[in-house]
Image (cartoon, rainbow, N blue to C red):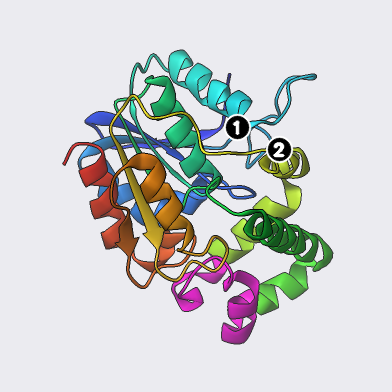
Amino acid sequence: MELAFERRGSGEPLILIHGLGHHWQAWLPVMDRLAAARDVIAVDLPGFGRSPGLPDGVPYTAESLADAVESFCALLGIREPHVAGNSLGGYLALELASRGTVRTATALSPAGFWSRSELLYARAMLQATRASARSIPPERAAELAENPLGRALAIGLMVAHPSRMTPTALLAATQAVASASGFEPTLESCTHMMPPAPPKSPITIAWGERDRLLPRRQAVRAARWSGQRVKLLKGCGHVPMTDDPALVTRVLLEGSGG
């Protein structure tokens, strides 16, 4: 499947997959750092960013989204890449590792390890974020992005340090969640999301210490599922790339082979 993407660097290929409502630009804080050692390819999932939606009749499930990533890699002539993802993207990375179609998978605060109440909370917060993004006029959104308090209110659920996100990046993220055609059907499919089958490829799981969307207690379940310790990203929120680019880069490089 043809998907929008950004490609930088050289070396072993590393596919980066964003979370629900985001776009490939979520990885901008770490892309150039990673590109010094990897052929980095950040992709927009179907129905997000600038990628077209899935074909008519294809549901927005984790399986179909993972299929789309596999098809995208095939179009680029990439076999068994390293893959990393955040939130929904983290779940998809683990799903690809379960299929054994990737060399390694690194998941940052992956979805799917929640309790029922935690799932309902996350759905409500994501729906509220989407509704807010769609209701604010562009000029008002620009004012909020420039204001420290407004920035904290707009993005505080996702990052631990809103001041580290530039107004330009915040406006782009707001537009991404507001315009994503795949948002509702993908969010609906999350209701049925369970941890994937045991991985056939090496995996790394890391969790934001200050994750407010998927609290870090879910990391305990991820550790039980994986049979290994989960790395704690100190001082980071749910989307850690902005909070600590150096730390996230180190985790992704270690997870993809050192």
Cβ atoms under marks 1 and 2 closer than 8 Å = yes
Question: Which quadrant holds residue 145?
Answer: bottom right
Mark 1 lies on a secondary structure that is helix
Position of residue 14 relative to residue 162, above or below, is above
Q: Is residue 94 left or right of residue 123?
A: left
**Quadrant where the N terminus is found in the figure:** top right
Most extreme residue toward the left, as rendered? 258
Position of residue 17 relative to residue 200, above or below, is below
Q: Is residue 175 left or right of residue 71?
A: right
Question: Which quadrant holds residue 137?
Answer: bottom right
Question: Which quadrant holds residue 127?
Answer: bottom right
- The residue tagged 2 is 189
Identity of the residue drawn at 45% across and 71% down: 210
Magenta span includes 152: yes
Identity of the residue drawn at 27% across and 51% down: 251
In this picture, which residue range is highlighted in magenta? 145-168
Q: Which mark is residue 19?
A: none
Q: Earlier in the sequence, mark 1 or mark 2?
A: 1
Position of residue 148 relative to residue 202, above or below, is below
